[in-house]
């Protein structure tokens, strides 16, 4: 018997993100790191004028970081974004810009291709903006049933970090255990390992291989890594070592659930994704 499940995939990946404005302040640095980890490359420009004179290559996302209420050229920003065919643009405004969406509402309305958000809203806005969409995939219920017999190890430094993941695994019918560090030789036949960066920070492919081999794993075991804004080369190193899934914090519980329930049917998912992208 087959069952339809939903998985999350990324459409229209970010080839080049053009970042305009400050990136080092405490208010914007985390946003910049997130954007960098979700883009193949970033073109950084300090000012809008610099972005106009020094164009980026293959830009399909534009972020304008506005830290204060100094005069801002909404029309120029809109024209710049339109000059990159197929691009989308967001203006992220800091705490000193409170009220701008009201006081500048007429010029904002005249630049409809620039979406204004406040910096505090980035976690609710950017994941969707980077293009995560659901797909429905038909898989065998045998794979789903196998998930209920899994042993899932959560490797995290504190119970507060591990507990939500333990709950997710338990809700899928799996046996879940918390491991405080990677020295888990006494744990036998682990089917799934979820590594948190509190214990498993980004490292080289060779170091990842050593880390994964410390576990006594069952046949066809798989690994996931949850980290704070991992960069592209860090993700590549983890996956080259055998990590199946990499999630950036904050992540959705649905992503973990789908991985636990559907990774045995990974080939089915890949076919569906290829069809969707095509």
Image (cartoon, helix red, strand yellow):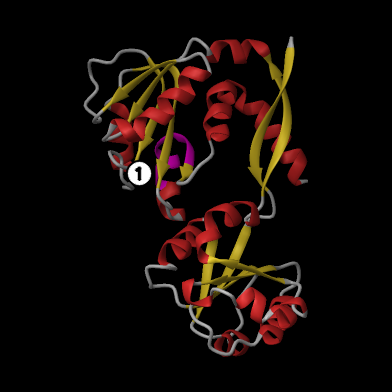
Q: At 68% from the left edge and 26% from the top edge, which residue is drawn? A: 268
- The correct choice, above or below, for 59 with respect to 104 in the image is above
Left or right: 163, with 252 as reference point: left
Who is closer to the viewer here, 13 or 228? Answer: 228
Examine the structure image and report whether residue 245 is included in the region drawn in magenta: yes
Q: Quadrant of the N terminus?
A: top right
Left or right: 210, with 247 as reference point: left
Left or right: 23, with 126 as reference point: left
Examine the structure image and report whether residue 247 is included in the region drawn in magenta: no
Secondary structure under tag 1 reads helix
Q: At 35% from the left edge and 44% from the top edge, which residue is drawn? A: 205
Q: Which quarter of the picture shows residue 206?
A: top left
Who is closer to the viewer here, 242 or 142? Answer: 142
Q: At 56% from the left edge and 25% from the top edge, which residue is drawn? A: 263
According to the picture, the residue beneath numbered tag 1 turns out to be: 205
Residue 111 position in % (x across, y down): 74, 78
Count of marks overlaid on the render: 1
- The correct choice, above or below, for 121 with respect to 90 in the image is above
Q: Which quarter of the picture shows residue 86?
A: bottom right
Residue 231 position in % (x across, y down): 43, 55
Residue 266 position in % (x across, y down): 60, 27
Residue 38 position in % (x across, y down): 53, 56
Who is closer to the viewer here, 221 or 66? Answer: 66
Q: At 72% from the left edge and 40% from the top edge, which residue is drawn? A: 274
- The correct choice, above or below, for 74 with respect to 190 in the image is below
- Give neighbour class at mark 1: few <14, some 14-19, many 20+ (Cα, 10 Å): some
Region in magenta: 237-246
- The correct choice, above or below, for 197 with respect to 106 in the image is above
């Amino acid at each position: 018997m087959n069952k339809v499940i939903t998985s999350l995939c990324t459409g229209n990946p970010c080839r080049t993100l053009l970042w305009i404005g400050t990136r080092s302040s405490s208010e914007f640095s985390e946003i910049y790191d997130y954007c960098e980890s979700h883009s193949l490359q970033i073109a950084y420009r300090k000012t809008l004028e610099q972005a106009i004179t020094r164009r980026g290559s293959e830009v399909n996302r534009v972020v304008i970081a506005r830290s204060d209420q100094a005069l801002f050229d909404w029309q120029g920003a809109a024209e710049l974004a339109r000059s990159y065919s197929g691009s989308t643009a967001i203006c992220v405004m800091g705490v000193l810009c409170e009220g701008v969406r009201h006081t500048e509402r007429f010029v904002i309305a005249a630049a409809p291709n620039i979406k204004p958000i406040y910096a505090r809203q980035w976690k609710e806005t950017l994941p969707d903006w980077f293009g995560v969409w659901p797909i429905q995939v038909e898989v065998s219920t045998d794979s789903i049933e196998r998930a209920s017999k899994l042993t899932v190890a959560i490797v995290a430094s504190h119970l507060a970090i591990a507990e939500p993941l333990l709950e997710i695994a338990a809700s899928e019918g799996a046996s879940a255990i918390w491991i405080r560090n990677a020295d888990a030789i006494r744990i036998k036949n682990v089917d799934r390992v979820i590594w948190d960066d509190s214990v498993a920070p980004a490292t080289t492919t060779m170091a990842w291989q050593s880390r994964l081999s410390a576990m006594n794993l069952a046949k066809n075991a798989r690994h996931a890594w949850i980290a704070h804004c991992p960069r592209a080369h860090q993700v590549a190193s983890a996956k080259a070592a055998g990590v199946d899934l990499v999630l950036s914090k904050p992540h959705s519980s649905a992503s973990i659930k789908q991985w636990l329930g559907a990774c045995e049917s990974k080939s089915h998912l890949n076919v569906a994704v290829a069809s969707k992208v095509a």
